[in-house]
Amino acid sequence: MELWSLDFPAVRQRVGTSGARDVPRFARSMMLFAGCAVALVVLTILNIASGSAA
């Protein structure tokens, strides 16, 4: 899963030392976005499964 990690040397070299502080914050933001997207999909599936879909 190293390709999904934002903390491997190629990314650190690419962003440089000034942007290196933003890498963990960006990773946290992406995790939050992914979590919200998954929650939305789960709620949609539950809505359809319960038969109350619009």
Image: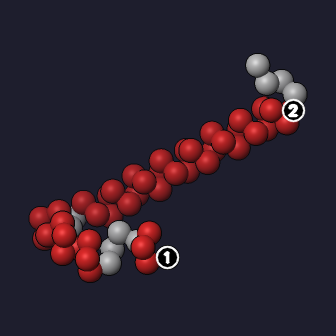
Q: Amino acid at mark 1?
A: Met
Residue depicted at 47% across the width and 50% down the height: 32
Q: Please tell me whether residue 50 is drawn above or below residue 12 in the rendered image.
A: above
Report helix, strand or loop for mark 1.
Answer: loop
Pick the front one: 15 or 21: 15
Quarter of the view holding residue 46: top right
Pick the front one: 19 or 48: 48
Q: Earlier in the sequence, mark 2 or mark 1?
A: 1
Pointer 1: residues within 10 angstroms few (<14), some, or many (20+)? Answer: few
The picture places residue 53, in percent across and down from the top left corner, at: 79, 24
Report helix, strand or loop for mark 2.
Answer: helix
The picture places residue 14, in percent across and down from the top left corner, at: 19, 70
Q: Please tell me whether residue 27 is drawn above or below residue 44 in the rendered image.
A: below
**47 lies left or right of 3:** right
Q: In the picture, which quadrant includes the C terminus?
A: top right
**1 lies left or right of 11:** right
**25 lies left or right of 52:** left
The picture places residue 19, in percent across and down from the top left corner, at: 17, 63
Q: Which residue is mark 1?
A: 1
Q: Amino acid at mark 2?
A: Ser
Q: Please tell me whether residue 38 is drawn above or below residue 1 in the rendered image.
A: above
Q: CA distance from mark 2 to mark 1?
A: 36 Å
Quarter of the view holding residue 10: bottom left
Quarter of the view holding residue 36: top right
The picture places residue 33, in percent across and down from the top left corner, at: 47, 47
Pointer 2: residues within 10 angstroms few (<14), some, or many (20+)? Answer: few
Instruction: Determine which of the numbered discs, if any, sits on residue 50 in the image.
Output: 2
Residue depicted at 71% across the width and 38% down the height: 43
Residue depicted at 49% across the width and 76% down the height: 1
